[in-house]
Amino acid sequence: MIGRAACGTLARMVITLHSRGDFTLANFAAVSRDGASIRLTADACARMNARHAAFIRFLDTEPMPWVYGVTGTIMSGRAVILTPLERRAQVRRPIAAGAVLFGEPMPERIVRGMLFCRLSNFIEGHAAVRADVALAVAAMLERPLPQLPRRGHGAAGEMLLLSHLFGALVEGMNLEEKEASALVNGAPVAAALTADSLLRAGPLLREVVDAVALAIDVYRAPLDACDSVLGELWQNPYAERALALLARATAAPVGPPRLPQAPVSFRAAPRLLARALRSYEALRVTAERAIGAVTDNPVVVGEGESMRILVNGGFFDADAPAIFDDFAGVCADLIRLLEKLAARLAETADLATLPRPAQARLRGLVSALAGYAEDAASTASRTPLPGTEGGGAPQNDLISPVVQAWAKQTAASDLLSSAAAVLRAVAACVQGDVHIDPLELDQALRDRMVSVTHLELSLE
């Protein structure tokens, strides 16, 4: 639910959260990119407080249940039961001491998205935290945010990054059992990275479609390969959509085609764009599920006597790395396509009439695209499960590769943005316009990729 609250002379957007059903992409975008604040409903707060109270009563039953990180822990490969005194001391363990990463920080919009996604664990009581903790997380959106370095992520889950994010909050609040663990466990980082990547991907792919269409127009390629009937013949709904997008973007032919059959790069373009749309759809489905998922460990389910505490691997997001790898590969292939289109366009230039500076510029642009294609190829590799053990502890023997995969996908996306800008400049140069600056085109697209707040690949 979205509303607006007066803030001086300005109106600030407020997102109201009542249940996990409110964790939508639209609300994620409002919080992460539009600067919206969060309000929790009274019913949601009451539900969280009731679940926390029930959880504490559950801990006090006889015999005391073993709850990882609360009444027990794993040390040297064996389970250790904590005394009541140790149990209370466990609440005050120094979370901020684990904030040891450094280097270039995550973008602020992604950090805001992590705070939004963190609350999906809390809102229906599955983390057994009090409403005060959830309200404190929401309040972080109103203050300068902690810096979250993007390098050195080598934990089994996301605790290193979340220690940077919530360390000060943990040590500044009077927390109760499980609340510190609930702040730094789970997978809100992967959820935020996936949702933000989806929002970036829409304007990027739309620009690639438009750049390909421009190349088709300038080359005067036959439009047979863009006929809408092909999608049905190929039994590929993503091809049908790619063909429709190209039809919207291409201009009416002026004169006969340059050749009766265009090079393969032009004829294969709809198929490669269809492949990109399939990857985009997988990213969308993953993001929509992730932002509202309960990924806490341990997680509290059931009520009253049926309450159970489940130790699980929700903090280990196995979907996001594969989705990021796939999209990075798509970007690399699309850059290679744009490189071939640019080379074929450059061959059509009338060098007899093109000024010498324009000839040199054309060669430089095509060479730059070849370089972007090689750079992108290095990102198009599968991110395997790391072989090292997180923290050297047997308990944490499998590291999550989500941040590393996201970094490669982000680099590939940025290279594709540059490649689309260069292809536009090549097309302009072939037509005699040497004044289009690909750097300005690239920057404009990158600005849009991090500001758009809706899914931008519809035909509306």
Image: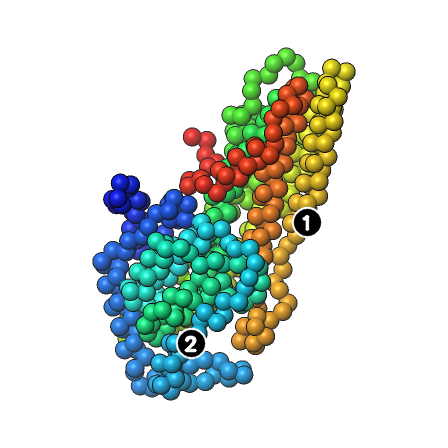
Q: Which residue is mark 1?
A: 378
- Residue depicted at x 56% and y 53%: 406
| Number of other residues with Cα within 10 Å of mark 2, as a class: few under 14, some 14 to 19, many 20 or more | few
- Residue depicted at x 58% and y 57%: 404
Q: Is there any visible trace of residue 174 in the rendered image?
A: yes
Q: Quadrant of the C terminus?
A: top left
Residue 442 is situated, as x and y percent measured from the top left of the image, at: 57, 35
Q: Which residue is more in the foreground, 286 or 378?
A: 378
| Number of other residues with Cα within 10 Å of mark 1, as a class: few under 14, some 14 to 19, many 20 or more | some
- Residue depicted at x 52% and y 35%: 444
**Residue located farthest toward the top when viewing the structure as drawn:** 255
Residue 414, located in which quarter of the rendered image?
top right
Question: As shown in the figure, which amino acid type bears the numbered disc 1?
Answer: Ser
Q: Which residue is mark 2?
A: 93
SS for dot 2 = loop
**Residue located farthest toward the front when viewing the structure as drawn:** 8
**In the rendered structure, which disc, 2 or 1, sits on the residue that comes first in sequence?**
2
Residue 213, located in which quarter of the rendered image?
top right
